[in-house]
Amino acid sequence: MRRVKKGPGRRPQSAKRARFMELRARGWPIATAGREVGVSRTTASNWARGYKVYRGGQVVGFVDRLDHLAVRAISARYLSQDERILIADMRRQGLTVRAIAAELGRAPSTISREVRRNGGHDGGYRPFEAHRQATRRRAKPRCRRLETNLQLRTLVGELLAQRWSPAQVGRHLRATFPDDRSMWLCHESIYQAVYEPGSTLVRPPAVPSTHLSPLRTGRDHRRAHQRRDRRRPRFEQPMLSIHDRPFPPEDRTQPGHWEGDLIVGPGHQSAIGTLVERHTRTTRLLHLPARDADALRAAIGARMADLPSWMLRSITWDQGTEMARHLTIAADLGTRVYFCDPHAPWQRGTNENTNGLLRQYFPKGADLSIHGPDHLRAVEDEVNRRPRLVLNDATPADLFAALLASPNHQPLRR
């Protein structure tokens, strides 16, 4: 394979950088923003965090992260990054300052000052480094109040060392110094000081802890957030909420409604699917060769295909990614799939209780991939033949068999 040499006039991905920074400002994660603009994960990480420069196996420099000022549109009276690249190209061609100025439509003094001001120590002119220097000068950084007020910094550091939250510190400062506004700080200013690289506020707390950060979350950097209306859906759309179900969670009078979830092994490397019929508490287990949406779709389709339509009216699941193919499952089985609210396991109380019973057979921390379909069927039969107090000491297997034999049954009394 012939290697194509990259010349000095190679253009940067200016439009992609600007779009990347715009997405990051909206709260998009680094990898997602990089994938959206069409760059690799490494490039996106370099833009967001910076990277080290190696020469001969040794670190010789560090390229700062991409600054939003570097990609923001500025007035045409200032030199752009593309113009700086042209200046570098024409200097390598041996053109004079006046010739370069005429080509760019700039004053000769502008080109001369640019080369003299942003040129390297060796007399060379590197356009990307020159643009970064110009961006840093345009930022006009100012000192924070915590840097100029030693008393305030000491007090904030002592409170953070006692695991006070920035909001608590801010309220305490206002209550302690009601007439001295120079001792006031909002919680965002404290967060920025904590997240600053090399911050002296990040130190071990007074009481030993595994977290070096004074924040409750233990973070030493800001986590990107995203507005709810800009979040990408995790599932195929449309999604049916549990609130769209025609009966409340506590109503179990109608048979044929199922609740499902996964029992997960260590490291989320193995799983077993569980389905429980709400009326009779009948349990069915799903053998999953892999913990993904395609494996779950195939397992549910194979295990529930023997049921009549009136015994498979709906399936309620939590918002795990394993149910991403819910539209396909609903179409294959002729049923509806509902999703619970986030962090609301009580909306699938029957399934949660059953998963607790199944831990007798599949304890936490055990590898679940060693259990084949035959063993799962044996566990399923044993659980379904246990008498239940809620069923007046009847067994789920007997009630389920009676339902299949005669759909016009009397509802169980609760």
Image (cartoon, rainbow, N blue to C red):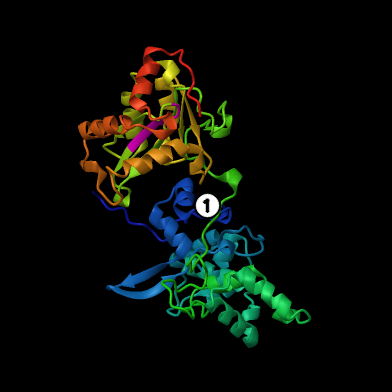
Q: Residue drawn 51% across and 24% down? A: 253
Q: Secondary structure at mark 1?
A: loop
Is 310 in front, or is 148? Answer: 310
In magenta stretch: residue 360: no
- Where residue 136 sits: x, y (%)? 57, 72
From this view, report whether residue 29 is shown above or below residue 196.
above
Taking depth in this image into account, of 331 and 255 the one nearest to the observer is 255
Residue nearer the viewer, 74 or 194 = 194
The location of residue 401, given as percent across then percent down, is 35, 19
Q: Position of residue 300 (x, y in %)?
A: 35, 28
Q: Amino acid at mark 1?
A: Trp
Circle 1 residue:
28
The residue lying furthest to the right in this view is 179
Relative to residue 271, is residue 314 drawn left or right?
right
Magenta segment, which residues? 273-279
**Residue 246 % position (x, y):** 57, 26
Q: Residue 48, relative to residue 150: is it above or below?
A: above
Please say whether residue 231 is visible from this viewpoint: yes
Residue 80 visible in the picture: no
User: In terms of secondary structure, what is the magenta stretch mainly?
Assistant: strand
Mark 1, Cα crowd under 10 Å, few <14 / some 14-19 / many 20+, is: many
